[in-house]
Image: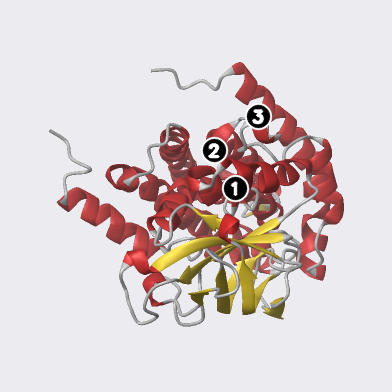
Amino acid sequence: MDFDLTPELAQLQQTVRRLAVDKVKPRAREIDSTGEYPTDIFEAFRDADLLGLCLPEQYGGSGAGILGLTIAIEEVAKYSNTVALMLLLTRLPTGPVMIAGNEDQRQRYLPGIATGELRCGFGLSEPQAGSDVAGMRTRAVEDPDNPGGWILTGTKCWMSGVVEADWYTVFAKTGDPASRAHDSITAFIVERAWEGVSVGRTDHKMGVRGIDTGELILDGVRVPAENVIGEVGGFRLAMLGLNAMRPIVAARGIGLAEGALMYATEYVKERAAFGKTIADFQGIQWEIAKAAVDIEAARLLTYRAASLADQGKFTKEYVPFLSMAKYYATELAVRVSGLAVQLLGAAGYMEDHPTEMWYRDAKQLTIVEGTSQVQLGLIGRGVLAHDLWWD
């Protein structure tokens, strides 16, 4: 069992680490304060060929896979979870297309993501259907004027990148709108430029500012048959796509925790108190040590999960391992960012230091793409079903 990164992944890590220090770190506070989309950083990622990390080479990507994207996001998230989200959005909406899309769809929509010519969003949640995905009300009815086509009507909410996206992966009810059966939900590729597609309100967020989150409104949008992803009634595709995303979200948590702990550690080594530095106190050292252990444990869980996902192991029997990574790493981000604020004391609560930004950003990670409670439920059911068992 080899725990070392391949030479290619190690080189990727070093490349992104330098870019994060040079480009992301100096801009992180400004992005958070203004809430403006960091076009300059998007262009830096484009120029460094980082927008297609998880895409296969035949579609213009680098073929680094989910593990490669996980490593890159970890480095970027040390300084900005907004910028880390920018990289995440190269995989979340494209995942269903890669898993179940046909060759025509992949050729039309994936290369533009890798080159930065296109951006995309993921439409699953609705005002009354967050964790309860089957409760969605967005409706797709057959288009009488276009055989095989559909007409979509409804509103998606809490969509990251909704303003910047050129196309969206959208899930809608193709069966009985009241049905909770999984075969009543289907995935579609919807282009921003189509008639009836518009962006509604954008949200005022506690953290992760700089990439708009908001509503996508679908008002009688005609979707041709060639833009149905997979089979009609293919809701399982949404779950497979989210399963494969668990380590990518976890990487945001690990990176945030690393950045917060490193910053706080340097601070306590310099802060004088009671005739010594704060770092000289054993109680402080123990808290730093516990956080360091948790970070390394989270990384092992997350890299294993990413490796599984790259092998196509994101079906039911692997869900506990994927959910563990997301649960542990994102809860870790909350704990360590809270510790960082505490280690700085009153200073940590002020905008003079990035600790309060990390603290605000961390909480989002325990909610998006399956809350911590959803992950615990998935892990628990996996143990009960012996998908996770020890004999």
Answer yes or no: is residue 277 visible.
no
What label sits on residue 149 in the rendered view? none
Image check: 28 left or right of 336?
Answer: right
Q: What residue does disc 3 label?
A: 57
Q: Residue at x 36, y 78 (%)?
A: 176
373 or 78: nearer the eye? Answer: 373
User: Mark 2–mark 1 contact, CB under 8 Å?
Assistant: yes
Residue displayed at 69% across by 78% down: 196
Question: Which mark is first along the chain, 3 or 1?
Answer: 3
Q: Amino acid at mark 2?
A: Ile
Q: Quadrant of the C terminus?
A: top left
Camera-side residue of 233 and 242: 233
Query: What separation in Å lies between label 2 and label 1 (alpha carbons)?
Result: 8 Å
Q: As shown in the figure, which amino acid type bears the numbered disc 1?
A: Arg
Q: CA distance from mark 2 to mark 3?
A: 14 Å
Q: Is residue 137 left or right of residue 32?
A: left
Count residues near mark 1 (Cα–Cα under 10 Å), then give few for <14, some for 14-19, many for 20+.
many
Q: Nearer the viewer, residue 37 or 312?
A: 312
Label 2: state its secondary structure. Answer: helix
Choose the circle earlier in sequence order: 2 or 3. Answer: 3
Work out whether residue 155 can be spotted. yes
Say what amino acid the circle numbered 3 marks.
Answer: Glu
Q: Is residue 128 left or right of residue 24?
A: left
Disc 1 versus disc 3: nearer the observer: 3
* Label 1 sits on residue: 91
Left or right of residue 243: residue 48: right
- Distance of mark 1 from mark 3, alpha carbons? 14 Å
In the rendered image, the residue lying farthest to the left is: 391
